[in-house]
Amino acid sequence: MAGIERLQAQFGSLRLPVLFAGKDTQDRAERYLAGVRRRASMRRILFGIVVVLPTVVSAIYYGLIASKKYVSEAQYIVRGVSNHQSTGLSALLTTFGISRAADDTYAIQNFMQSRDAVRQMEERLPLRAMFSRPGSDFIARFPHFWRGDSFEMLYEYFQQHVTVLQDQTTGVSSLRIVVFSPEDAKAIAAALLRLGEERANRMNGRAERDTVDNALSEVERAEAKVVAAQADLTAFRNHEMLIDPTQNSVAMLDTISKLSGDLAQTSVQIGEAVSGSPSSPAIRSLQGRAAALRQGIAAEQGKMAGDDSALAGKVSAYERLTLLRDFADKSFANALNALESARHDARRQKIYVETIVEPNLPDQDTEPQRTRSVFTVFAMSIAVFAMGWILLAGAKEHVQ
């Protein structure tokens, strides 16, 4: 009955009649105690593996092995000339300077954390050597002993130690570099800022070239239309042997007007002669002159309008060609104005990477935060242990 006595000492005597009443009470008590001991032993083993071991390992690593790391920080803002209409205080502020370019800020930020930036950094700095300085611990240095020395691994390592964050309220971006040497941290931060400025200048040049090239293309097309319209007008003049058909039409109208005046005067003279002396021989001469004037007027009118050789068709064609030339001239003038505006806008669209806080030279290591790191490992281990034990207990109850 030793098993029952131990159970009574542990759980009290109230539950024993229910749990172990009947036959084979001693065996059932022993089996129950063995199960309790197994669960306690399993709990201790699991706690040691999941909680104690990681915490001890992290304490040994961060306390004895982890190398000192230095942090260099810088702050910058991407600015560009504002082309937006604004009112009130914002209009007053943007009148005297340049405004924040939000979209371009993201572009510069993404570039600083891109593979292109890492490649360009490798051309300027011994990046791999900086990430594996003598004295750095075997876990933190590059390359990791369980991974290779490829460019992709360098890029991932770079991303882990270079951080670029933007304050959405102020638009100021913060650059943070964490490496094993204070000089290396400052050099990497300064190089990244220079790369950001160069990228901004490249974006400026591309935008200016695109804007001006499009405007130049419009000018060239408008100029070609002017040349074509002038060539068509010259070909018409050579074919018709007329400089300005409208001037010829004015001369013809003057001739017709003069002949009409002479005809009217001759008609008056004929009327007077017929009334005064019907048998006068001058009447026939006057009538012949009137007939000649009528023929001259009809001939001039035939030149003005009638068949395809008449001047009216030539004037119409000439006016159409001059109208096309005038349109081409106006389009060319508008294209020239657009080109000048494009050049002006291209100059106004430039963005600038303005450094607010220069990269500092750290005089004390601030990474890793050893106590905090060990406590973080301990807290996470406790959480994993609790979750795992709950899952195991639930699974056991489900099986039973």
Image (tube, grey):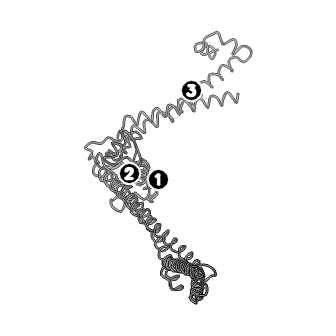
Eye-nearest disc, 2 or 3: 2
Image location of residue 90, percent across then percent down: 37, 41
**Amino acid tagged 1:** Trp
Residue occupied by mark 3? 40
**Residue 16 placement (x, y as % from top left):** 66, 13
Q: Earlier in the sequence, mark 2 or mark 1?
A: 2
Query: As rendered, which of 283 and 37 lies closer to the eye?
Result: 283
Local crowd size for mark 1, using a 10 Å CA cut-off: few (<14), some (14–19), many (≥20): few
Q: Verify CB contact (< 8 Å) between mark 2 and mark 3.
A: no
> What is the C-alpha distance between the residues marked 2 and 3?
41 Å
Please indicate whether residue 322 sits to the left or right of residue 129 in the image.
right
Which residue lies under the disc numbered 1?
146
- Rendering coords of residue 203 (x, y %): 40, 59
Say few, some or many: other residues with alpha carbon within 10 Å of mark 3 (under 14 / 14 to 19 / 20 or more): few
Residue that numbered label 2 is attached to: 141
In which quadrant will I find the N terminus? top right
**Circle 1 — which element?**
loop
- Which is nearer the eye, 394 or 358? 358
The answer to whether one can see residue 212 in this image is yes
Specify the amino acid type for callout 3.
Ala
Lower position in the chain sequence, tag 3 or tag 1: 3
Distance, label 3 to label 1, CA atoms, is 37 Å
Judged from the image, the secondary structure of the residue bearing numbered disc 3 is helix
Residue drawn 33% across the image and 43% down it? 93
Q: Residue furthest right?
A: 23
Residue 69 marker: none
